[in-house]
Amino acid sequence: MYTELNSILNTTPDSFTQGEFVLLSDRQSDASFLIHHFLSLYLRARCKVCFVGLVQSFNHYSAISQRLGVSLTQAKEKGQLVFLEGQKESLSVLIPQENDTGSQAMDFLRDPSVGLKSLYEFVRSAVSSNGEGGGDGTEEWGPPVLLVDDLSVLLSLGVSAGAVLDFSHYCRAIVCSQLQGNVVMLVRCDGEGEEDEGDDEGSERLMKGLTHQCSLTLHVQGLPTGYCRDIHGQVEVCWRRRQGDGQYTQKKLFQYKVHDKGASFFAPGTSSAVL
Amino acid sequence: MLPELLQGVDTGGLLVIQDSASYSGRHLLQSFINAALNREEAVHVLGFEVSEEELKDGLRGSPVQRLHFHNAYTDPLGWTDNPAFTVHQFCLGELTRLVKQTSHSKPATLVIDSLSWILRHVSTPDVCKTLQQLRKGGAVRSIIGLLHADMHQRGTVGSVCHSATSVITVEPAMRGDEAVAKITKRSKSGKVIQDEEIFRIKDDLTVVVQSKSSKGAKKADSEEQETDPTANLTFNLRLSDTERETKQKLALPFVFSKEKKTALLHSGPGSGRIHYEPDANDDYDQEDPDDDLDV
């Protein structure tokens, strides 16, 4: 986890807001470094994590988390982490073997118009099985967390934007509202956006719909002035709902740089390369 | 106009609050719910987008006994075995049954959060038909709906707002805690009133209108500023009368009167004359540059 991002979001492994739906988005950039932050943060916070990894293999996340000080293999063995490796599971759907015991989570690949109900069922069973192991000596974990990387690839696989929004709604209903856990989802856009008519099924509609559902967005973009070696881009953090003191939307802009073992965030213009 | 609407939507009216991803209209919706509850009206909320706890959390301090929340949030598509209310139950019969379950002497106000959720699964004509039937039906006194305008095509938004008696479009304002409301109100006589106001919602969910929008204020400013620019200067820009006369008499060098033109064009005796003999090179024909066509 990145300590500067923790202080920006006011979270620590010991105390973080529960029931939050965090939306990570990027436009012509790559926000996946934020997924690693949240993964290591919630694993350190001893939460029960369900990770739906549709774009990369388990080893990829494992290698990066190792550099951030968290072992995914260990977490998986202890039962803290439930990892859906989308690429591997999809093979068993596309090339079925006799002795396949895979879950039905990726069944939407057979018929994308059916929707993501089976994927939701997988998530539900993963997050709800928290208290079952308490009796026979296995560890009790904290509130459940769902991480999805990423939702836009579902659009490329033929699922409609409406079905993805339904899936995120149901995940939010069960994880955030019912179990008081957190949901972190990554959605990616390309192009400039702002298409008014016509593109009913596009990534813009998905992004707008998710923005309405979430309580915190982190939007990653390149610098408006172009490529820079020392600053990799900017992150706009937007708090959409604030219980307590005022309910107005608050936005903050930061610039970031990704290192080998983390990422640093700073106010615009205060990069160490410039000062 | 916003406080007027908060005091009560007319009987048989449909108020649509349009918002976008940059500013959520749910806060204003909660203000409307709060105002209705304070008027001792029964409010039925059909909640698709937020859970009951979240909605009631925002309504702290309001008398929520008369608030009836119909849970369409946990299972709106019937994915579990016994859903409370699904989106496909959004029709006149089901909604009338839902509202009449809790018996009240006065017809209630129905709040729909949100219409966008329903429009994703039910076709626009059906939604408009149901809203129209509800308005005329008498089971509910008035309907308030939240619509995310940026999630639908313009035609869909237009159709729903066409059946509304009042539309409030909210957008973020310059200051963080304020917002701009563009209001269109259609009265029963057919008159349409439009207004734009900047408002702020306080902690107790009352709405404070800060000012009319800056559009009206800007015009007055530009008129006021047309004061005398030659005043308050350290040098003198004013003209006395003699100076003004001399200025008007002055003939400018390149402004030609008719006499001056003819004098210049027809040169007098003794001045140089220009004698021109046609030169072969000057006779350039665009269509025959090499001059070798036998035309």
Image (cartoon, helix red, strand yellow):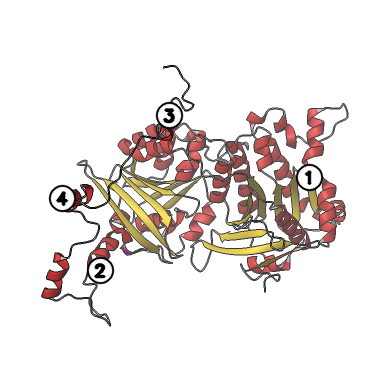
- Classify A210 as above or below B231: above
- Labels 1 and 2 touching (C-beta < 8 A): no
Q: Position of residue A150 (x, y in %)?
A: 69, 45
Q: Looking at the image, tell me whether mark 3 or mark 2 is earlier in sequence order.
A: 2
Q: Looking at the image, tell me whether mark 4 or mark 3 is earlier in sequence order.
A: 4
In the image shown, does A191 or A17 lie closer to the viewer?
A191
- How far apart marks 4 and 2 lie (CA) works out to 41 Å
Residue B225's disc number: 2
Question: Which residues lie in the magenta part?
Answer: B204-211
Q: Is residue B186 left or right of residue A262?
A: left
In the image shown, does A94 or B213 lie closer to the viewer?
B213
- Classify B191 as above or below A229: above
Q: Are the residues under marks 1 and 4 on the same chain?
A: no
Residue A56's disc number: 1
Which of the two marks, 3 or 2, is nearer to us in this view? 3
* Residue assigned mark 4: B258
- How far apart marks 1 and 4 lie (CA) works out to 85 Å
Q: Would you identify the image quadrant in which residue A271 lies?
A: bottom right
Which chain's residue wears label 1?
A
In the image shown, does A186 or B40 lie closer to the viewer?
A186
Q: Position of residue A60 (x, y in %)?
A: 82, 49
Kindly identify the residue that appears in the image at 70 percent across and 32 percent down: A108
Which of the two marks, 1 or 4, is nearer to us in this view? 4
Quadrant where the C terminus of chain A is found in the figure:
bottom right
Q: Looking at the image, tell me whether mark 4 or mark 2 is earlier in sequence order.
A: 2
Tag 4: residue type?
Lys
Which of the two marks, 1 or 3, is nearer to us in this view? 3
Q: Position of residue B166 (x, y in %)?
A: 32, 46
The kind of secondary structure element at disc 2 is: loop
Q: Is residue A244 left or right of residue B181?
A: right
